[in-house]
Image (spheres, rainbow, N blue to C red):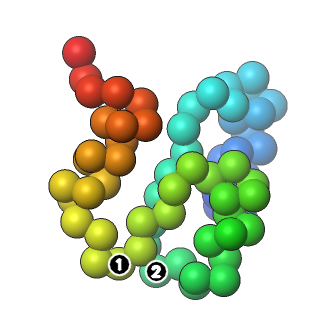
Amino acid sequence: MTLFAAVLEQLAAKDASDIVVFGGGIIPEADIPELEQLGVARIFTPGATTASIVDWVIQRVGAPA
């Protein structure tokens, strides 16, 4: 909770809130809605495949050039 909040705060301070923030790991289910409220675009929980994460990134920010 504190790390995501700090990253989002610093991005906002640098007028870089257009950067998509996402993450994952062992994050309590109860924290996910609060993280989304803070502006985290997506939280991937354990078991998410690399392919599903890559697919989400491509859909969200586009494929590499």
Furthest-left residue in this view: 51
Dot 2: within a 10 Å radius of its alpha carbon, few (fewer than 14), some, or many (20 or more) residues?
A: few
Please tell me which residue lies in front, 24 or 42.
42
Which of the 4 quarters of the picture holds residue 31?
A: bottom right
Q: Is residue 24 above or below residue 60?
A: below
Could you tell me residue 56's position as x and y percent?
35, 47
Could you tell me residue 7's position as x and y percent?
66, 47
Residue drawn 28% across the image and 77% down it = 47
Q: Which residue is mark 2?
A: 26
Could you tell me residue 35's position as x and y percent?
68, 63
Which of the 4 quarters of the picture holds residue 63?
A: top left
CB atoms at circles 2 and 1 under 8 Å apart?
yes
Element carrying mark 2? loop
Residue drawn 69% across the image and 49% down it = 39
Q: On the picture, is 58 further left or further right than 33?
A: left
- Among the two numbered marks 2 and 1 on one chain, the one whose residue lies closer to the N terminus: 2
Element carrying mark 1? loop
Which of the 4 quarters of the picture holds residue 64?
A: top left
For the question of whether residue 35 can be seen, the reply is: yes
Q: On the picture, is 10 further left or further right than 40?
A: right
Please tell me which residue lies in front, 48 or 5.
48
Q: Which residue is mark 1?
A: 46
Alpha carbon of mark 2 to alpha carbon of mark 1: how far?
A: 6 Å
Q: On the picture, is 57 further left or further right than 7?
A: left
The amino acid beneath tag 1 is: Pro
Residue drawn 75% across the image and 55% down it = 38
